[in-house]
Image (spheres, rainbow, N blue to C red):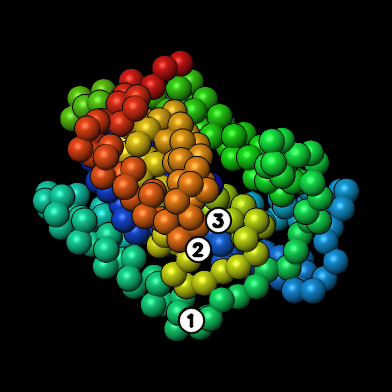
């Protein structure tokens, strides 16, 4: 889930050199949208979990709802907030302040509409243990989250590396001026970048809801910051780096909570961010989006 959210940071930074701190609220919208998707097909808290074909359909509804809502929200954010700043040649600091403002606005908007209390999710699938490895329980819900996340990340990597639109994204990331002279529509590429990042964050939100079965107006804050840490750890602006950073951060975080105690879990994650920025600010891979390999 960290990796899916981190991809949004990576894509936007790779093209615009902008850290979109409102991306955590795009994730939050995906969590709420997946919950509303369940309500739309008649699932309520307390209903029995799904099995077989009904389970597959329900998971698809959650993921599609989360991706659609978050992708649309990201596109609107780019059109309303960031595009006017780009056209006026505003400094990056202005875009950063705008991102923080959007983040707070969306949090309070959802708090006003849905309250500040936690909302529960219906249980979508039963959590059966498939096997136990060295004391670690491998359950059905964990396998579903991992498989879905890997499939989405591989699909994005192939899209950027092999398609015409992907080449446009890489060209804009490398040199937007030259890309525009070669016929690349920069506005379209930027919009596509926000759309892809938003859709992946929405998928992450749906998987978050399926796994943790909760939604709250500020639920995106901590996962968003940790996903930014994952993007920096792997090499921000690098799609494969976001995947690697998300995986490593999750492993390091859980290792740290095991050794130091669960209350140190978040502290350990942010310590990783500080160390990376101090000793290897380009991240583990340190490769730009513009150099994505086919």
| Disc marking residue 62 | none
Instruction: Please report contact status of discs 2 and 3: CB closer than 8 Å, yes or no.
Output: yes
State the SS at label 2.
Answer: helix
Specify few, some or many for label 1: CA neighbours under 10 Å numbering under 14, 14-19, or 20 or more: some
Residue appearing at x 76%, y 46% in the figure: 140
* For residue 17, side relative to residue 255 (left or right): left
Q: CA distance from mark 2 to mark 3?
A: 8 Å
- How many tags in the picture? 3
Which image quadrant for residue 237? top left
Q: Secondary structure at mark 3?
A: helix
CA–CA distance in space, label 3 to label 1 = 18 Å
Whole-percent x, y for residue 98 in the image: 23, 62
- Choose mark 2 or mark 3, whichever is in front: 3
Residue 271 in sight: yes
Position of 152 with respect to 194 (left or right) is right
Query: Few, some or many C-alpha atoms within 10 Å of disc 2 (few <14, some 14-19, many ≥20)?
Result: many
**Residue carrying label 2:** 29
Asked whether the residues under the numbered discs 2 and 1 touch, taking CB atoms below 8 Å apart as contact, a structural biologist would say: no
- Residue depicted at 52% across the width and 25% down the height: 158
User: Is label 1 in a helix, a strand or a loop?
Assistant: loop
| Residue 189 at x, y percent in the picture | 35, 38
In the picture of the structure, the residue carrying the numbered disc 1 is: 116
For discs 2 and 1, the disc positioned in front in the rendered view: 1
Label 3 vs 1, first from the N-terminus: 1
Q: Decide which of tag 2 and tag 3 comes sooner along the chain.
A: 2
Q: Which residue is mark 3?
A: 205
């Amino acid at each position: 889930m960290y990796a899916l959210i981190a991809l949004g940071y990576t894509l936007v930074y790779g093209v615009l050199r902008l850290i979109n701190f409102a991306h955590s609220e795009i994730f939050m919208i995906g969590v709420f949208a997946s919950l509303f998707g369940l309500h739309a097909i008649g699932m309520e808290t307390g209903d029995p979990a799904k099995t077989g074909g009904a389970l597959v359909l329900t998971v698809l509804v959650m993921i599609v709802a989360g991706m659609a809502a978050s992708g649309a929200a990201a596109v609107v954010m780019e059109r309303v907030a960031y595009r006017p700043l780009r056209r006026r040649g505003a400094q990056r600091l202005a875009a950063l302040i705008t991102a923080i403002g959007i983040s707070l606005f969306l949090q309070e908007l959802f708090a006003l509409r849905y309250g500040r209390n936690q909302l529960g999710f219906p249980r979508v699938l039963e959590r059966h243990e498939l096997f136990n490895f060295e004391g670690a329980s491998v359950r059905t819900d964990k396998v579903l989250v991992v498989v879905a996340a890997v499939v989405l990340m591989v699909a994005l990597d192939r899209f950027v590396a092999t398609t015409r639109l992907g080449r446009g994204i890489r060209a804009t990331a490398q040199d937007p001026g030259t890309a525009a002279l070669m016929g690349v529509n920069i506005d379209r590429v930027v919009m596509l970048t926000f759309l892809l990042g938003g859709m992946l964050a929405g998928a992450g939100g749906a998987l978050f809801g399926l796994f943790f079965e909760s939604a709250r107006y500020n639920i995106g804050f901590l996962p968003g910051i940790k996903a930014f840490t994952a993007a920096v750890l792997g090499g921000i602006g690098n799609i494969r780096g976001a995947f690697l950073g998300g995986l490593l951060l999750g492993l390091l975080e859980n290792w740290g909570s095991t050794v130091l105690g669960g209350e140190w879990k978040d502290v350990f994650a942010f310590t990783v961010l500080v160390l990376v920025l101090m000793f290897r600010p380009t991240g583990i891979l340190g490769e730009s989006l513009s150099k994505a390999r086919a």
